[in-house]
Image (tube, rainbow, N blue to C red):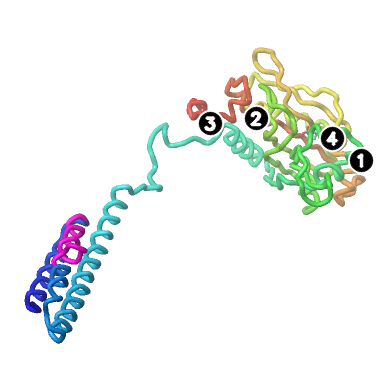
Amino acid sequence: MIDEIRVLAGDAVARARAAGTLDDLRALEAEVVGKKGALAGFKRRMGSLDPDQRRHVGQALNAAQWEVADALGARRDELDQAGRRSRLERERLDLTEVRAGRDAGHIHLVAQVIEELEDTFVGLGFRVAEGPEVEDDWHNFSALNFGEHHPARDMQDTFFVDLGAPGEVVLRTHTSPVQVRVMECQPPPIYTVMPGRVYRNEAADATHLAVFHQLECLVVDRGITFGHMAGTIDMFTKAFFGEGFSTRLRPSYFPFTEPSAEVDVRRPDGSWLELGGCGMVHPNVLANCGIDPEEWSGFAFGFGLDRLAATRHGITDLRDFLSTDVRVLEQF
Ligand code: PHE
């Protein structure tokens, strides 16, 4: 009987090693070590043996059981691993693969405008700076000469962040706080543009978004005049849109510039686009940033970039910029 058991075990081990599939292994397992398998059959026959023989046969059965179970387990691991390897190979995703042609992805229209404007201004000798989108009251308002009770601090326009003292931390409502940051960390002369995302607590419509983009420009030097500002704005409008576009300035008010103006761009069809604000940097703002207003003067402007991009591409609803339909961007 012991010889029969050894032969059975040796045969089962050989078949396990040669098994080609997990199903084959399962069948072999049932046939040999399962409850109704061949080894169990020997166990049932043990009852008729005398105690000494029973002990030897019992040991042989246990040894056979382990031997076969080991061979089944080892082959199962091999088959599992091979299966995983082939599945990995089959389902492989090459994330470095670049798809050719128009499917290759697009830089968003607003990002295109930002890159182009940066190039235009860098070509004129300007630097580019950026600031945080989550700002403190000092940079977004106080340093910019907003009085304590200026309406722009109202809940209506500003998203407040639940950090620090109430009302202390905001999502910046414009890129002008970056002016303050630039002046705080570098002495004049300053020729810098500052693009970025800004936030206003407003309902979105065709010409307004709650999250939009501005390009801020700041020049601080000796003897800077309103004429330098008007000339710079007109120059960049023509550089960006091409001939046929012109600009006008309308008197306006901002706490941080004096005098202040609104900038409109005239389209070739004679219609006007409201672009943003501008003005001579208020002496209080220079002083707040540690710059002597007796020695230095400057101008600043801030433009809505989403409107620039829309005008250039004939887009009539700014909300299209937020569309998740790739066909919108694919046109450009
Ligand atoms: N920050 C102003 C706005 O968002 C625009 C502006 C910038 C006006 C610089 C004057 C000078 O409306």
Question: Residue sitting at 53 percent across and 31 percent down?
Answer: 324
**Which one is earlier in the sequence, the residue at label 1 or at label 3?**
1
Category of crowding for the residue at label 1, using alpha-carbon neighbours closer than 10 angstroms: few (below 14), some (14–19), many (at least 20):
few
- Residue found at x 83% / y 40%: 298
Question: Residue at left 66%, top 26%?
Answer: 307
Q: Which residue is mark 1?
A: 148
Q: Earlier in the sequence, mark 2 or mark 1?
A: 1
Vertical position of residue 232 compared to residue 141: above or below: above
Q: Amino acid at mark 1?
A: Glu
Q: Position of residue 22 (x, y in %)?
A: 22, 57
| Alpha carbon distance from label 2 to label 1 | 30 Å
Which residue in the structure is indicated by mark 2?
A: 306
Q: Provide the residue designation for mark 3.
A: 324
- Picture coordinates of residue 190, whole percent (x, y): 76, 46
The image shows residue 197 at horizontal and vertical percentages of 68, 39
On the image, numbered disc 4 is attached to which residue?
A: 154
